[in-house]
Image (cartoon, rainbow, N blue to C red):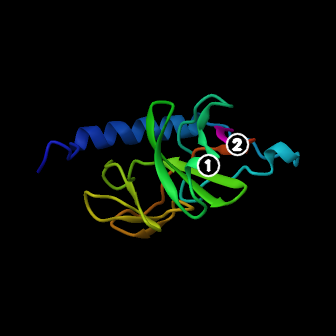
Amino acid sequence: MTAETPTRRTVLTTGVAVAGAAAGTVVLAACGSDSDSGATQGSGGSSAAAAPSGTTVAALSEVSVGQAKSVTVNGQEAILARPSETTAACFSAICPHAGCTVKPDGSELKCPCHGSVFNTLTGAVEKGPATSGLPSIPVKVDGQNVVTA
């Protein structure tokens, strides 16, 4: 074991906090305006706790199309992906299996603790032991920036 391995108490506490935050999160659907046309979410799991609407996550140009990068949203580790030129997706970087932080690795997001693999663009689980995807964080493209929705 290393100092980075979470304890059972840490995993349970984190899971309860995420579940409580997700239960209180309201996801707003795009109303069809041009400014909302770039809004997408990861489809890997339930919504994670969101930052206040309009908080800048990163410049759109910081993420290549088809790739992802690690970011911080509302003080939490997150993954920002760019499925297309005009869309972005964001999800929690915390593996639902044991609470470790996943990292972008080419076309995959990999958990260093137990080997779970997630889809870079959707957060969906591709290889266990995780049985659910990464919780989504609602974002949208606003001009040249990706912001919380």
Q: Are marks 1 and 2 in contact (CB under 8 Å)?
A: yes
Picture coordinates of residue 142, whole percent (x, y)? 74, 40
**The disc label shown at residue 144, or none:** 2
Foreground residue among 93 and 104: 104
Give left or right: position of 32 versus 138.
Answer: right
The earlier-in-sequence mark between 1 and 2 is: 1
Start-end of magenta stretch:
144-149
Q: In this picture, is 94 found above or below 64?
A: above
Picture coordinates of residue 149, whole percent (x, y)? 69, 38
Picture coordinates of residue 99, whole percent (x, y)? 33, 48
**Amino acid type, residue under disc 2 in the picture:** Gln
At 54% from the left and 55% from the top, the residue drawn is 45
At 59% from the left and 59% from the top, the residue drawn is 43
- Label 1 element class: helix
Foreground residue among 148 and 136: 148
**In magenta stretch: residue 14:** no
**The disc label shown at residue 61, or none:** 1
